[in-house]
Amino acid sequence: MKIGILALQGAVREHRNLLRRLRVETVDVLNPDDLTGIDGLILPGGESTTVGKLLVRYNLLEPIAESGRRGLPIFGVCTGLILLSKHINNSEQHRLGLMDTWVVRNAFGRQPASFEADMVIPAIDSKPFHAVFIRAPYIEKVGDSVKILLTYQEKILFAEQGNILAAAFHPELTDDTRIHEYFLRKIRNSLS
Ligand code: GLN
């Protein structure tokens, strides 16, 4: 199995290291050819307006959107969650638009810019996951085909729609591999 990691900006190395620990081959995605032969794609955190512009400049926006529509498993983290969403509150920024979600950026108003909290994610297991948030977005509303995997203080923070998975927090910044393993299971299911 080979996983592409969008490497235009942001926390690329952390995903790479985590996947290596799981003995999964990775490739940095910087141009459309890099999408050939990958079984899944991770969109790391960063700054979504900037990454959106870079996706256009590197001719990656439409090829990734097309791959996602054709069924390529894609996991978006934070900025990745924003880019995957069809609707972004008060923003016309570039996006892939693969998920029927309504997203609010930088949304934890009175919370500090970064915070951490232990959360139980039933789809993973019953042991709490230490979730790290950095200027995080949240999903305020979803369409019928989106499955909600985690809600916290009425904010949707983890969700999936078919081959697409999105998290508002950063599983690559912990030693806990369970969220990535969940994504790998999704890929294996789509391959079998
Ligand atoms: N606030 C950032 C944005 O709007 C996301 C932050 C992150 O990816 N950690 O793109």
Image (cartoon, grey):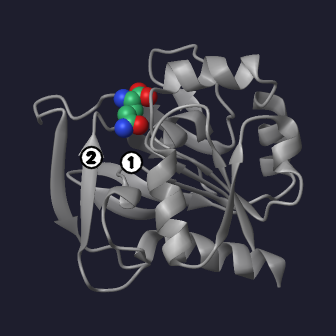
Asked whether residue 141 appears in the rendered view, the answer is: yes
Secondary structure at badge 1 equals loop
Is ligand 1 less than 8 Å from the beta carbon at label 2?
A: yes
Residue 53 position, x and y percent, is 63, 17
Using the rendered view, name the quadrant where residue 61 is placed: top right
Q: Disc 1 or 2, which lies upstream in sequence?
A: 2
Q: Could you classify mark 2 by the number of other residues whose Cα lies within 10 Å: few (under 14), some (14-19), or many (20 or more)?
A: many
- Image quarter hosting the N terminus: bottom right
- Image quarter hosting the C terminus: bottom right
User: Quarter containing ligand 1?
Assistant: top left
CB-based contact (under 8 Å), mark 1 and mark 2: yes
Q: Left of 5 or right of it: where is 88?
A: left
Residue 118 position, x and y percent, is 18, 67
Asked whether residue 105 appears in the rendered view, the answer is: no
Give the residue at mark 1: 168
Q: How many marks?
A: 2
Between 2 and 98, the one nearer to me in the picture: 2
The residues tagged by marks 1 and 2 sit, at their Cα atoms, a distance apart of: 7 Å
Q: Could you classify mark 1 by the number of other residues whose Cα lies within 10 Å: few (under 14), some (14-19), or many (20 or more)?
A: many
Residue at left 10%, top 30%?
110
Give the residue at mark 2: 133
Residue 27 position, x and y percent, is 71, 54
Reply above or below: 31 against 37.
above
Residue at left 74%, top 20%?
56
Between 139 and 74, the one nearer to me in the picture: 74
Reply above or below: 56 against 97.
above
Secondary structure at badge 2 equals strand
Amino acid type, callout 1: Ala
Residue at left 12%, top 36%?
111
Residue at left 69%, top 34%?
96
Amino acid type, callout 2: Phe
Residue 131 position, x and y percent, is 26, 59
